[in-house]
Image: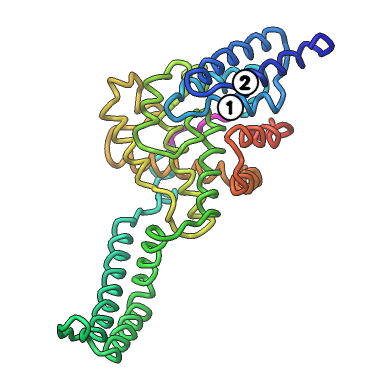
Amino acid sequence: MESLQPAEQYNAVLLSLLARGDGKERTENAQRAIELVLEMTSRRLKLTSASTKLLVDATARADELPVLLRALSAARENGACRAFAASSLRLPDRPSPSAAASLKPVPADERSSEVTAAFAFTALVLGTLGLEVADVLDFLVGADYDAPPLPLVAATLVAGWAYDRYAQRGEIVATVGRGLSRLFSRDLQRECTTESASFMVGYLLGLPCCAFMPTATRPLDMIAESKEPMSALTGRDGSARLVDRLLIWLLAPVAAEKESFGDLVTSDPSVAANLLSAARRREASLGIDVSAGGWADDPAADEARLRWAFSEARRLLQRYSGMREELQEQMVAGVSVGDCVVLIEERCKNQWGMI
């Protein structure tokens, strides 16, 4: 150790500290590592990519988001995570009513009807097959089962397909297909498309929940736990607008999936509206101004706000489309949270004027 430069010594200690322990010991090591990073910053010593990766991986736990926020904030102050809550990434002002009306609406969520249609179709097919098999083998059980004739079944299917094809433009088959996909299939590319969009947008906006599945309640708990440091990090001039940032993060996977696949299977657009409603109900206990940014408290304003957040998510995804695609490829390969952070930082290193 004595032969190493000071920065190398600190990074070696960090690597050793973060690479061992589990459970409570791991949490304590992560806390000590954060203090060590702050000490490095005070001495103008830089974190390496390997140390940054391990620091994030050691603190990325869904039940300890304040610890992850401290780690990312410390790394940001050190210069290793400059893209996290990028200071020049400011939210635009609330659009005028006419401008908001011209924005694309948030895609509708039809998962309930799709799953219901898939269940009904599956039950119908299995029931028909069961009757046909019972009709053939009824002599084994000494009972008499009457199944519909196969020609009648075939004719009914053809008639149903023709009706859907020419009268409904294939919507029934498409609905059943999406429902079956939700129930029985897993599309890794689609999942990684939505996860990469959520991660990248959340990270750039300064949300420590970026590494986890979007929900309508956990982000509000995070605000309750870490409102002050998050506000200081994302809006030193009082413009943090944490609820707006959460809405953009929640709608980023929706925008990415809609753009890439044309429909929604993995992402859930209703989560953003549910979060906004929950934030208004808990406004007093959260201690935040849900209307920050000039938003009114009425259904029409909420719809415009969701349109605006969806538009902002689309804008960020288009601006950093190359980085999101590379992040998606890494996620398909199975990288860790820390690897994703390092990738974003490396891609943004020479693009500070664009953030």
Q: Residue 256's mark?
A: none
Q: Can you say which quadrant of the picture contains the C terminus?
A: top right
**Tag 2 secondary structure:** helix
Which mark lies nearer to you, 1 or 2? 1
Residue indicated by mark 1: 56
Q: 119 or 292, which lies in front?
A: 119
Residue indicated by mark 2: 75
Q: In which quarter of the image is residue 290?
A: top left
Q: 53 or 209, which lies in front?
A: 53
Range covered by the magenta-colored residues: 87-94
Q: In the rendered view, tell whether residue 310 sits above or below residue 56.
A: below
Give the side of residue 172 with respect to residue 254, left or right.
Answer: left
The type of residue carrying mark 2 is Ala
Q: In the rendered view, tell whether residue 28 sits above or below residue 223.
A: above
Give the side of residue 172 with respect to residue 79, left or right.
Answer: left
Q: Where is residue 312 in the image (x, y as percent from the top left)?
A: 50, 41
- At x 25% / y 29%, what residue is drawn? 281
Q: Position of residue 255 (x, y in %)?
A: 48, 49
Q: Position of residue 288 (x, y in %)?
A: 35, 21
- At x 34% / y 85%, what residue is drawn? 158
Q: Can residue 237 be seen in this view?
A: no
Q: In the rendered view, tell whether residue 286 sits above or below residue 307.
A: above
